[in-house]
Image (tube, rainbow, N blue to C red):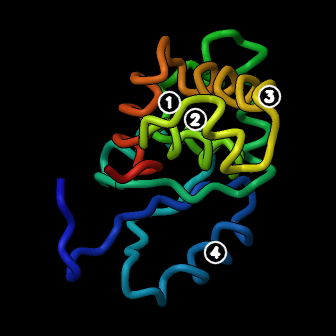
C-alpha cells in the first residue's frame, strides 16, 4: 500500500496506566501524520487492533518489556493466548540491528557492513543472527522481506 501525503497513519495506543495512555495519545494526536484510533490495556490490544484497522501500535515501554519477557518465557511469542499484534516484534530490533537490516537490503556482505558501520565481522554476524531470531526468519532474504513489510526497510 502506497500512502499519499494526505493519508494519516492509524495508531493504537497501548499501556497499563490510563495516565500513560492519555499522555501517549496527547503526544501524537496533534501530529498531522497520525490518527489515534483507540487506546487500551495490553489485554485487549489484539482485539482492538483488528477492529480499528490500526496500522501500528504505540506501546508504553514498561508494558512492551513485560510483554517481551512473558512471551519469551511462554516459548510461543504469545503472552496472553491471543494473536500477537503484527509488527510488535519489529519494535524489538535495536537501532543498530535496523541499520544492519537496511544494509542487508542493499545486498551488502558482512565484510562491507562491518566496514560501513566501523564494527568487526564477528559483531555483524552477531547482529544478523539476532535479526533472524527476532524476526523469526530463516534467511537474510526473508529478514529483508519482513523488514520491508514491517516498514523498517525501504527499497
Q: Nearer the viewer, mark 2 or mark 4?
A: 2
Residue 100: percent from the left, percent from the top?
A: 61, 41
Q: Judging from the image, what secondary structure is the residue with disc 3 in?
A: helix
Q: Judging from the image, what secondary structure is the residue with disc 4 in?
A: helix
Query: Decide: marks 1, 4 in contact (CB < 8 A)?
Result: no
Q: Nearer the viewer, mark 1 or mark 4?
A: 1
Name the residue rendered at 60%, 46% in the picture.
98
Q: Which label sits on residue 128?
A: none
Name the residue rendered at 67%, 20% in the picture.
129
Q: Which label sits on residue 69?
A: 3
Query: Decide: marks 1, 2 in contact (CB < 8 A)?
Result: yes
Q: Nearer the viewer, mark 3 or mark 2?
A: 2
Q: Earlier in the sequence, mark 3 or mark 1?
A: 3
In the rendered image, is residue 86 in sight? no
Query: Decide: marks 2, 4 in contact (CB < 8 A)?
Result: no
User: Which residue in the structure is indicated by mark 4?
Assistant: 22
Pointer 2 local density, CA inside 10 Å: few below 14, some 14–19, many at least 20: some
Q: Earlier in the sequence, mark 3 or mark 2?
A: 3
In the rendered image, is residue 37 in sight? yes
Residue 70: percent from the left, percent from the top?
A: 76, 25
User: Which residue in the structure is indicated by mark 1?
Assistant: 84
Query: Decide: marks 3, 4 in contact (CB < 8 A)?
Result: no
Pointer 4 local density, CA inside 10 Å: few below 14, some 14–19, many at least 20: some
Q: Earlier in the sequence, mark 3 or mark 4?
A: 4
Amino acid at each position: 500500500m502506497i500512502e499519499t501525503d494526505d493519508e494519516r497513519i492509524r495508531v493504537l495506543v497501548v499501556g497499563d496506566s490510563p495516565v500513560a495512555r492519555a499522555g501517549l495519545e496527547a503526544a501524537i494526536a496533534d501530529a498531522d501524520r497520525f490518527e489515534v484510533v483507540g487506546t487500551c490495556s495490553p489485554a485487549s490490544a489484539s482485539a482492538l487492533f483488528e477492529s480499528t484497522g490500526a496500522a501500528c501500535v504505540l506501546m508504553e515501554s514498561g508494558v512492551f518489556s513485560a510483554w517481551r519477557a512473558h512471551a519469551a518465557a511462554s516459548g510461543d511469542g504469545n503472552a496472553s493466548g491471543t494473536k500477537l499484534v503484527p509488527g510488535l516484534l519489529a519494535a524489538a530490533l535495536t537501532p543498530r540491528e535496523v541499520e544492519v537490516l537496511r544494509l542487508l537490503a542493499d545486498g551488502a556482505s558482512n565484510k562491507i557492513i562491518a566496514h560501513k558501520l566501523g564494527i568487526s565481522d564477528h559483531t555483524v554476524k552477531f547482529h544478523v543472527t539476532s535479526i533472524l531470531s527476532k524476526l523469526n526468519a530463516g534467511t537474510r532474504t526473508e529478514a529483508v522481506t519482513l523488514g520491508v513489510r514491517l516498514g523498517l526497510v525501504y527499497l
